[in-house]
Structures are given as C-alpha cells and as structure tokens.
Image (spheres, grey):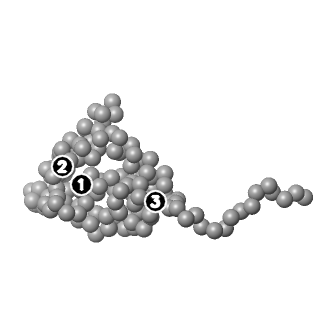
Amino acid sequence: MQKTPFVLNTKPLPEASSAHAGALATSRAFRALGYPELIEEHLAIKQRARGFSEAQQIESVVLLQTIGGECVEDIKVFRNDRLIQRGLGYQPPSPTALREFLAAFHDAALEAKRPSPENQLAFIVPESDALDALAQVQAGGVERIA
C-alpha cells in the first residue's frame, strides 16, 4: 500500500474563508445589473442618513434568499462571516434592522380599508407606495436583463 503524495495541513487558513462564499456571485450580479442605482432612484424609505442604505438592505435580503434563509434571523450567518463582510464592503444588517426595513413596506392605513367581515367576500390590500416603488425597481432590472 502506498502513501498519498500529499500531506494534509490541519492549521486553519489565515485569510478569510466561508462556506457561503458563492453568495458573493449573487452580490456581484446584483451590482452589475445596476440594482443599487435603481433602488436609489425609485425607493425612498429611509428617514435618516445614517445606517444601511435601501440597496444594502435589499442586497442582504437577496443574499439571504440565495443561501436558503427562511427568516430574518438567518441573516446572522452573514453577520458573523468575515469573508462575506469583506466581499460586500459592509457588515450585513442585524435581524432587527432588517425586520424594521421590511415592515416599512406595510401600510396599515391601506389595510384599514378592508370591509367588515360580514360584507367581505374577497379583499386584496392595495400596494403601498413603497411596494409600488419596489415594483418599479424590479421592472427596471428586468429591462436591463432583457
């Protein structure tokens, strides 16, 4: 029986590495298609200049979906990943920040237009202004792809 011609090195790599490094390809495509610019052009949810931009928040959600995340709590995988942080250029938002961002798409005033249960056969809540802006972002992305 022969020995293998290589030796396994058990020391950890000094550079950043990640099991989720493939998610950065999604980030690269997201940015190459110009989604950050489209988001900046159409979406205006933020009320303060500090914190994450809308593009960073949406990019984080897209990456979370790419790796199969099922809830905002799963963003912790990226928050603790040095390679993902270095590749993105920012630490992804916390679950709380992401949840607050997603809640900004909900407009309680639109839901209040729902008829009473005894008069209601079917009701679809109209789109909020934020959801309408997000639809414009998506339309712009599809146009760029086509």
Q: Is residue 103 visible?
A: no
User: Where is residue 90 shown, x and y percent of the image?
Assistant: 34, 60
Q: Please name the residue that numbered disc 2 is placed on.
A: 43
Residue 112 place in picture, x, y as percent: 10, 60
**Could you tell me if the residues under marks 2 and 1 are in contact, i.e. CB atoms within 8 Å?**
yes
For disc 1, the marked residue is 54
For the point 41% across and 58% down, which residue is it? 86
> Which residue type carries mark 1?
Glu
Relative to 135, 1 lies left or right: right
Q: Residue furthest right?
A: 1
Q: Is residue 57 left or right of residue 127?
A: right
| Secondary structure of the residue carrying numbered label 2 | loop
Expressed as whole percent of the image width and height from the top left, the position of residue 123 reads 17, 52
Q: Residue at x 37, y 55 (%)?
A: 88
Q: Secondary structure at mark 1?
A: helix
Q: Farthest residue to the top: give it.
A: 146
Residue, disc 3: 83
Say whether marks 3 and 2 touch (CB < 8 Å): no
Give residue 46's quadrant in the image: bottom left
Relative height, residue 144 to residue 15 (above, below): above
Query: Can you give x and y, in whole percent of width and height, for residue 57 in the image?
Result: 28, 57
Q: Earlier in the sequence, mark 2 or mark 1?
A: 2
* Camera-nearest label, 3 or 1: 3
Q: Residue at x 43, y 51 (%)?
A: 24
Q: Residues within 10 Å of mark 2 (few under 14, many from 20)?
A: many
